Amino acid sequence: MASFIERMCLYLVLSVFLSITQAVDRSNFKTCDQSAFCSRQRALKPGQSSYRALLETLELSDSHLTVQLLNNNNKVLLLLELYRLQGNMTRVKINELKPIKPRYEVPDVLITDPPTELMSVVAQDEHRVVLSLGGEDWRLILSAQPFRLDIMEGPQVLLSLNSRGLLAFEQLRIRKDTKSQTDTEEAGEKEDTEKHDKEKVSEGEEEEAEEEVDQPGMWEETFKTHTDTKPNGPSSISLDFSLPGVEHVYGIPEHADGLRLKNTDGGDPYRLYNLDVFQYELFNPMALYGAVPVLLSHNTHRTMGLFWLNAAETWVDVSSGQGSSEVPQTDVRWISESGIIDVFIMLGPRPNDVFTQYASLTGTQAFPPLSSLAYHQCRWNYNDQEDVSAVDQGFDEHDIPYDFIWLDIEHTDGKRYFTWDNNKFPQPKDMLQGLLDKRRKMVTIVDPHIKVDSSYKIHTEIRSRGYYIKNKDGGDYEGWCWPGNAGYPDFTNPEMRKWWASMFAYDQYEGSMGNLYTWNDMNEPSVFNGPEVTMHKDALHGPWEHRDIHNLYGFYVQMATAEGQIQRSGGLERPFVLTRAFFAGSQRYGAVWTGDNAAEWGHLKMSIPMCLSLGLVGISFCGADVGGFFKTPSAELLVRWYQAGAYQPFFRAHAHLDTPRREPWLFGPDNTALIREAVRQRYTLLPYWYLQFYHSQRTGQPVMRPLWVEYPEDIATFSIDDEFLIGRDLLVHPVTDEGSSGVTAYLPGNGEVWYDVHTFQRHDGAQNLSIPVTMSSIPVFQRGGSIICRKNRVRRSSSCMENDPYTLYVALDSQGNAEGELYIDDGHTFKHETDKQFIHRRLSFTGNSLSSSDLSPDSQFPTASWVEQVNILGAQKPDAVTLTTTDGGESSVGFEFDPDTAVLTLRKPGVNAGVNWTLHLR
């Protein structure tokens, strides 16, 4: 039997490989027409709403308002709850008033129960209720017939809910043709059904309900060879939102598409359903590995956000056109298979306000270890310990820094996670110690499919504890994945997550050490022989079907893994966990990447809008496989990808098992030199990257951001997704076209100036700049008015640079001013939070003086780093430069001035980076 299983597993795996050599097989994944609930909901026509609000049932408490909604057709009652939340947000919840069983409400994603503010009724009649949302101009209007909500600022409608009448709520029901086992059960069900029907209509409602007719797919549906049973029948929900004056909407990742969401009229909606999609297509609304149901709207006056808190399969229709009075309008419709309607309306009004509002709900990006922002080297798979050692040595021999080397599934004992192949990796601690001696680290893959093997401790523990997901009949759910027959732990169970976390302890994960970190892959979850290469929807997580929680699975896997890394260090060390599947809130647990891309120029281009979209919805720690996972890049493509990846948050090279080796030195000395330079640029900028992640962890602002975030009134920025900002102060336009001899970069900001970081040439803002490029070119510009700290002594890893000195780049604006910040801590523990062990300094150039002052006087952290050099861009030549420190000391500082570039270089001020000082230009 074992040999038969192994042969079947090999056959399945080879079939998968063969199917992905060209492109994704679309037939493996549903369209809306092939999804019963999506097809049903999309068949509803606008303007025919069957719902009305029963204003006589309205109740207003200190925390929220409730009112019943009646479906005029079937007489089912819904309960609408409205909350005015702190921070200029509104929450809308709609559920069945008396469902026959509870409907799923997403737990664990919100970091807290959002605090509310008082609402008050300012006007009411039989047709509508007007509520105050604070201030004189903010109003929420609840219209009764048909039901509709409008959020107003003065006379302006900001957003309307159900204005197109597409609210649809399929109630749970008992199947009419179900045969009871006994006459008693049949009579009891009949009595319960009759009672439920009577409760549908409120007192005084005498109209008869229309008999609901079952449609195909309501109780079960088949896709290819898989049948999905639906014991509770149809349960989908739908709601539309109208955004007057809006033409640009963004978000709802993950899709391999442009930054601005497209009109879906006449095509498929955007789909949010975490799936293992091999070699995905570009410019396609198909679902990919992660799902964040957050959409942002933006125009020159306001930025707003919609957060649709639902973890079931979801489709999003976007329709842009003209509203009333020829005003542009975008309509967005959300359709989910199950659960309730729970939507947060974030009213901005500025982009940064929306980021803050969303962060208050789901948390901010976890502050990563500094080393994880450096370069990562990965491949499926490094063969053995000798191979790891050779690759490690190769980086040293070619003077290319790196911090992490990664091991894919082949490092394990027969795809048994938390183990090592004893033949290939007989001494894992020796291997890890060798890396540690060079201040480097390793990542191993730990996937959530567990080999069914009675001799495998992880499997036997999970089975004995009852922690596996169950199939619809109550047995352990099993499917095919890399190890063959596999079980899938139920990560929605807190006890399972607690146990999983305990497996990362050093005495449990044998061969592990403190410099070993984790990669969670295949956690959509991927099931090779399942419907759409994932889990059956009627599988069970305790009382809930998998259809209810599907998009949360990867979120929980990463949560448990991150907690395990924290626990193994006694709560001292920050974790690093990479995940492929994700949901809203995943930013709290680590990094993501864009999955199984290909070595094609289009995939290099697409890495930019894909990561920008993720940053807009809270997930800043994003990257794409440098070089492309599938296929073989040309030397030119590989170099250009390294140059682009060096300026994206997560910087990792990765490659498929069947591709030729592509370590950076294998493409000839010229290309090695180009790759080396790109990687070194990343390392010099690590202080700036670290500062941006510090701010992101505190505020929720994206690290890698579209231009319109910082220039919200500049229409020219609204559709740009081939360049981006890192923080506020670095603008990057990677070269992403084959054989390119030039690019055109848009430099925003009327009256602003930008400096080429390589040549220090000054350019005015608000222009399209034509830039000639060679193979060594990485177009990057520093904003005038900013100060950026670099470490220009690049060593073999970031940890080796810990105490190295800083060089300050002071880019003056048109008024001759600039400011910036410097943040320093130990780079890897939580002591910056628990013990206030950090340095946070303000750097300011004004009145011909550059000063460093303390932004956090109550924190303390010793640093051996000092200021080695200051480069002032756009400067004039001074007669003298002097340095004063807090002890009253004063000394002269040597300088050089280049009149051709207008760069003033101050040599060796010799001052510690953590103290107050001032440089005076006289």
Image (cartoon, rainbow, N blue to C red):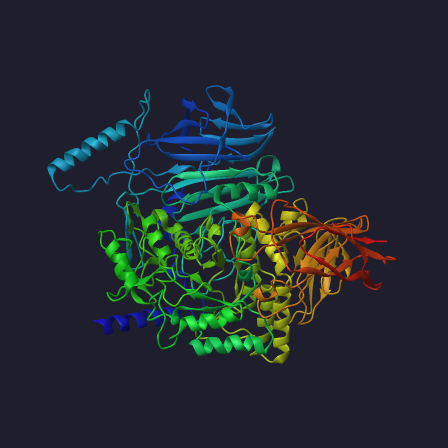
Using the rendered image of the protein, determine whether residue 381 is visible from the camera's viewpoint: no
Dividing the picture into quadrants, the one containing residue 73 is: top left
Q: Is residue 691 above or below residue 233?
A: below
Q: Quick one: 376 or 217, which is closer to the camera?
A: 376
Q: Position of residue 60 (x, y in %)?
A: 44, 23
Q: Position of residue 817 (x, y in %)?
A: 77, 49
Q: Is residue 517 left or right of residue 195?
A: right
Q: Is residue 589 left or right of residue 644?
A: left
Q: Position of residue 189 (x, y in %)?
A: 19, 35
> In this figure, what is the number of numbered marks?
0
Q: Quick one: 563 or 779, which is closer to the camera?
A: 563
Using the rendered image of the protein, determine whether residue 3 is visible from the camera's viewpoint: yes
Q: Is residue 89 above or below residue 442?
A: above
Q: Position of residue 11 (x, y in %)?
A: 31, 72
Quarter of the image with the N terminus is bottom left
Q: Which residue is depicted at the point 52% across and 31% down?
A: 150
Q: Quick one: 381 or 342, which is closer to the camera?
A: 381
Q: Residue furthest left?
A: 183
Q: Which residue is depicted at the point 61% across and 35% down?
A: 325
Q: Is residue 393 left or right of residue 340?
A: right
Q: Residue furthest right?
A: 879
